[in-house]
Image (tube, rainbow, N blue to C red):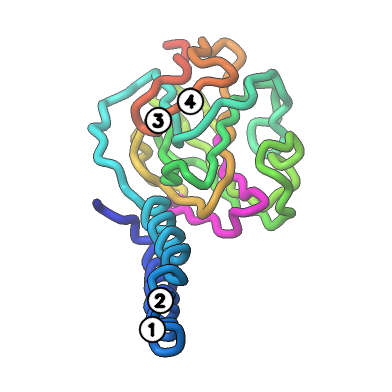
């Protein structure tokens, strides 16, 4: 199983803890060593599972909006996007549990025209206010069809580290990685009002594979 580079520190720490618990329990409570170590092995396996990198064949996209993360669609509504677009649009929000793959992918193909990191709170990720109050990063891409699409990584109550590798001027390719969020979080995508939404609340998504919307081809 391939593991994500962002997991290096967590995996090393988890390995040290498991080995220390096993060694100490063997020295002082030898009869119970494996029983004491077992819960730590389960937690270790969960850490490895969290940082897994699935092998996915990413296609070529032009007007399709691709799910940026694995998770569950928790919101589809008309909102005012006030940071960059400053206009009404459709917000699609996908919640990631700690068991989901947490690689963040570009939802559209085009050119990165904006990025900004915001310090903030750590409200539960499904809280509607988390989109504007929590620690987050906002990225905007201008597509090949001249749509400006905004998407936002949002830290949740558990997630305390947002990583993004993108810079203004970078080429964005739908389905390809641009960042990572550790331990449960949310992604918001803001789309033009004339976008055809192809998902519904409650749908589960596979990042880089599922088409969640279709942009109007001007």
Q: Which of 3 and 42 is in front in this view?
A: 42
Q: Is residue 166 magenta?
A: yes
The region drawn magenta spans 151-167
Answer with mark 1 or mark 4, whichever residue precedes in sequence. Answer: 1
User: Where in the figure is residue 80, as x and y percent of width and height?
Assistant: 73, 26
Q: Where is residue 132 in the image (x, y as percent from the top left)?
A: 73, 42
Image coordinates for residue 163, horizontal then vertical, percent: 49, 56
Q: Earlier in the sequence, mark 3 or mark 2?
A: 2
Left or right side of 185 for 31: left
Residue at 37 percent across and 30 percent down: it is 109
Q: Mark 1 points at which residue?
A: 26
Q: Residue 53 carries which label?
A: none
Q: Where is residue 114 in the image (x, y as percent from the top left)?
A: 54, 44
Cα distance, mark 4 to mark 3?
7 Å
Residue wearing tag 3: 206
Asked which secondary structure carries label 2, the reply is helix
Query: Between marks 1 and 2, how big is the CA–CA gap?
Result: 5 Å
Number of other residues with Cα within 10 Å of mark 4, as a class: few under 14, some 14 to 19, many 20 or more: some
What SS does tag 3 mark?
loop
Residues at badges 4 and 3 in contact (C-beta under 8 Å)?
yes
């Amino acid at each position: 199983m391939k593991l994500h580079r962002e997991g290096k520190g967590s995996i090393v720490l988890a390995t040290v803890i498991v080995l220390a618990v096993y060694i100490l329990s063997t020295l002082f409570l030898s009869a119970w060593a494996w029983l004491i170590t077992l819960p730590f092995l389960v937690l270790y396996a969960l850490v490895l599972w969290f940082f897994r990198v699935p092998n996915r064949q990413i296609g070529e996209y032009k007007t399709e909006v691709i799910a940026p993360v694995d998770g569950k669609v928790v919101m589809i509504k008309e909102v005012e996007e006030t940071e960059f677009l400053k206009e009404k649009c459709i917000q699609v929000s996908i919640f990631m549990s700690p068991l989901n793959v947490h690689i963040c992918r570009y939802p559209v193909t085009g050119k990165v025209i904006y990025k900004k990191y915001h310090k903030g709170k750590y409200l539960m990720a499904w809280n509607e206010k988390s989109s504007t109050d929590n620690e987050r990063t906002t990225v905007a891409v201008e597509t090949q069809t001249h749509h400006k699409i905004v998407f936002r990584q949002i830290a949740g109550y558990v997630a305390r580290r947002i990583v993004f590798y993108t810079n203004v001027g970078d080429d964005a390719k739908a389905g390809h990685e641009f960042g990572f969020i550790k331990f449960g979080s949310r992604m918001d995508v803001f789309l033009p009002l004339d976008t055809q939404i192809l998902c519904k609340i409650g749908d589960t998504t596979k990042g880089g594979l599922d088409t969640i919307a279709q942009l109007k081809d001007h």
